[in-house]
Amino acid sequence: MYQYINLEYFTLLISTGDARYNASVDFQCFVKEYAKIELRFIDLYGLRYANVYKRTLNGTHLQSLKLSGVIDSNVRRVQILIIFGPIEKKYLLKFLIIGCASTGKTCILHQFIENKFKTNVTHTIGAEFGSKIININQKNIKLQIWDTAGQERFRSVTRSYYRGASGALLVYDITNRESYNTIANWLSDARQLASSNIVIILCGNKKDLEDQRQVTFIEANQFAQDNDLIFVETSAMTGENIYESFLQCAQIILNKIDSGSIDRYKINSAIQSALSTANNRSENSLDDHQSRNKSIKGCDLCQT
């Protein structure tokens, strides 16, 4: 909870032309966690506008504040307000959904973002983008999620989206042996092109089609253990283990941030740089719920 402390009011002497304020106050204040200083300019009718003057963090002494500047001639008083509260940690994590075509990557993204199964899916060209805020241990985590094209002809394009990614879902179709046979190549790309500490969840999708299974749980789980991956089977159709996969991946990343093995600020910087590049390439946005894929439609491309 934030605590507001009113330090001082200052009466202004208004002269012809520009109005100026000169305010100073001596005080002693030790900031344990978070504080920001706000100037509130008050006219005859009450609060006119406010500006943040200064922000301080962790163990800082505030004292002898002196402020001056030009303000609107209608302002009669300047109020200094110091606001105390907890440090607000903002986390921004970039996730990838990778794997060969028709494994259900786009359906996984839509199920996670919109909590519904998307029908009549087309092959993704380049990448689709979606974002969602989740809460872990009372921390709001924004996930930027890139669903990359799985077709080989787009491979060189989709590699440009790997930069800055701290998490990935590597997806294969449990009813399609060929899709499973490609995961080693996708894993190699992710570890070479994304951040060195990328956390990868191996997802065997289309779990609801058990009677058509071609890849056993035991086989995929052994591959995951051999390659230091988390393994889960999912269904974009029913939503089973979709949210949990993203949540578990984000939790592992946060644990690495807290332990110091991942630098949160370097991650965010890399994300912003990569996002700027990728935005120039991407033609699709789930945030706007608009699909611009130009490809052959087929309702059987992504059953789950």
Image (tube, helix red, strand yellow):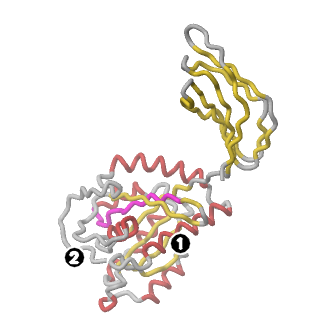
The structure residue drawn at horizontal position 63% and vertical position 35%, both measured from the top left corner, is 38
Q: Does residue 234 appear left or right of residue 126 in this picture?
A: right
**What's the magenta bit mostly, secondary-structure-wise?**
strand
Q: Which residue is mark 1?
A: 248
Give the Cα separation between the discs numbered 1 and 2: 29 Å
Residue 102: quadrant of the picture: bottom left
Residue stretch in magenta: 141-153
Label disc, if present, on residue 300 of the rendered structure: 2
- Magenta segment: does it hold 152? yes
Amino acid type at circle 1 is: Gln
Mark 1 vs mark 2: which is more N-terminal? 1
Q: Does residue 34 appear left or right of residue 228 in this picture?
A: right
Assess disc 2: are there few (<14), some (14-19) or many (≥20) residues with their C-alpha within 10 Å of its C-alpha: few
Q: Pinpoint residue 190: horizontal percent, then vertical percent.
A: 46, 64
Q: Secondary structure at mark 1?
A: helix
Residue 46: quadrant of the picture: top right
Work out whether 71 lies above or below 238: above
Q: Secondary structure at mark 2?
A: loop
Q: Residue furthest right?
A: 28
Q: Residue furthest bottom?
A: 211
Residue 262: quadrant of the picture: bottom right
- Magenta segment: does it hold 199? no
The structure residue drawn at horizontal position 39% and vertical position 64%, both measured from the top left corner, is 113
- Seen from the viewer's position, the closer of residues 37 and 254 is 37
